[in-house]
Amino acid sequence: MPRTYQRTVRKKPLAKYTDDRINSALEGKTSELNPGKNIKPQGGQTILSKNVEQLIVESLITCSSWGYPLTTLDLRTIVKSYLDTKGTNIKKFKYNMRGIDFAMCFLRRHRDTLSQRLCQNIKKSRTQVSRKDLNEYFNNLEHSLNNIPPSNILNYDETNLSDDQERIKVISKRGCKYPERVMNHKHFYYNQDSSIDAQKLLVKRIEVGPHYG
């Protein structure tokens, strides 16, 4: 190659870009405005931005850790309140209220962080039980159950073995096996069909003799 290169004239010369076009392409690359790179996802676009959805996810996890997990209805109400405060009106939703499909799609997009599980309803006084109280309880229980056959021991709680029909699915952090919801009052009144007397569950011990012959 010669020291001073001179471009030869051909029938079909190669494309030669000007300095302005090269600088414009470099600016678009550095500012991430490349149309071939920043392509939107296929289908309908989300109403909320990624930053807003991430804040909602963190808020849901925080409420669940405090003992007040939220449901899908609460999630839809939060989004409606946010859009109303912002002054945004989405015509395809009635009064900016999302449907259940929106909540399911939201959980599907953040399935690595959030999940739905049945919660356990506990009282506020139960959450205040310390490690010392639990150790004292089991120490007293060890002396109380001394010389008592296992067939006469029945484990039951203060609900009298009643099925809790207020258990609902709540949104919690993925990996949480037993989410708890703190509530002191229940609006559901148990009837005779949903409550079982613990004394009727005591099983009589029967000894079976050897087979004949």
Image (spheres, rainbow, N blue to C red):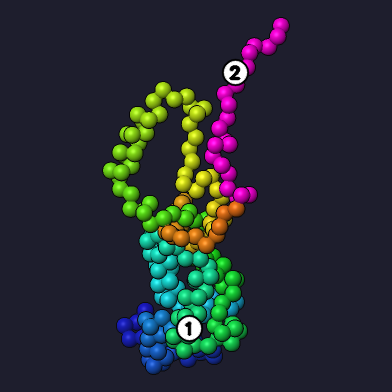
Q: Secondary structure at mark 1?
A: helix
Look at label 1 and name its amino acid. Answer: Leu
Q: Looking at the picture, does residue 82 appear above or below residue 71?
A: below
State whether residue 41 appears in this view. Answer: yes
Relative side of 130 to 92, left or right: left
**Mark 1: few, some, or many residues within 10 Å (few <14, many ≥20)?**
some
Which disc is residue 207 wearing?
2
Q: Tell me, for residue 13, which label it has, or none.
A: none
Looking at the image, which is closer to me, 40 or 94?
94
Amino acid bearing label 2: Glu
Q: Is residue 21 above or below residue 76?
A: below
Mark earlier in primary sequence (1, 2): 1
- Separation of disc 1 and disc 2 at Cα? 70 Å
Q: Residue furthest right?
A: 213
Looking at the picture, how far across and down is residue 40, in whole percent?
52, 78
The residue beneath circle 1 is: 83
Magenta extent: 192-213
